[in-house]
């Protein structure tokens, strides 16, 4: 349940990045997104979902705020929309394995 809520929050934050907001907002989004993707990677690891561990790890590296990856505003907008849609889609598509 926490995962679904966090995915929706991160997706909403990423979609708001399409607006012209103060630079501090984008920094905030980087911190939240990185933390969320690290959390999702650990949860995927616990469920032995190796592919998702890699996906979330790469996203954590892409969004991390320390060594910024300069892609330009247009590319970042595209990345934000694609990642937001994937997060929203994963809520409905992904069915985690039930542990015994």
Image (cartoon, rainbow, N blue to C red):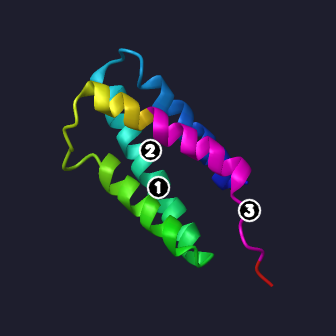
Disc on res. 14: none
Question: Is the residue marked by circle 1 packed among few (<14), some (14-19), or many (20+) residues within 10 Å?
Answer: many
**Residues rendered magenta in the picture:** 81-98
Q: Where is residue 1 shown, x and y percent of the image?
A: 73, 54
Q: Distance between the residues labelled 2 and 1?
A: 9 Å
Residue with the mark numbered 3: 95
Q: Where is residue 3 shown, x and y percent of the image?
A: 64, 54
Q: Quadrant of residue 21?
A: top left
Q: Per the image, is 95 magenta?
A: yes
* Contact between labelled residues 3 and 2, with CB atoms less than 8 Å apart: no
Q: Is residue 96 left or right of residue 6?
A: right
Q: Per the image, is 65 magenta?
A: no
Tell me the element at label 1: helix
Of the image marks 1 and 3, the number of the one nearer the N terminus: 1
**Which residue sits at x=47%, y=32%?**
81
Q: In which quarter of the image is residue 29?
A: top left
Tell me the element at label 2: helix
**Which residue sits at x=19%, y=38%?**
70
Q: Is residue 66 left or right of residue 95?
A: left
Of marks 1 and 3, the one in the foreground? 3
**Which residue sits at x=46%, y=55%?**
37
Question: Is the residue marked by circle 3 packed among few (<14), some (14-19), or many (20+) residues within 10 Å?
Answer: few
Residue with the mark numbered 2: 32
Give the main secondary structure, helix, strand or loop, of the magenta stretch. helix
Residue with the mark numbered 1: 37
């Amino acid at each position: 349940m926490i995962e679904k809520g966090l995915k929706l929050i991160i997706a909403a934050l990423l979609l708001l990045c399409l607006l012209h907001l103060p630079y501090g907002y984008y920094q905030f989004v980087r911190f939240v997104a990185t933390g969320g993707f690290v959390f999702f990677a650990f949860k995927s690891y616990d469920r032995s979902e190796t592919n998702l561990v890699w996906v979330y790890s790469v996203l954590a590296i892409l969004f991390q705020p320390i060594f910024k990856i300069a892609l330009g505003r247009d590319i970042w907008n595209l990345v934000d929309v694609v990642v937001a849609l994937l997060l929203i889609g994963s809520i409905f598509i992904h069915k985690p394995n039930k542990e015994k």
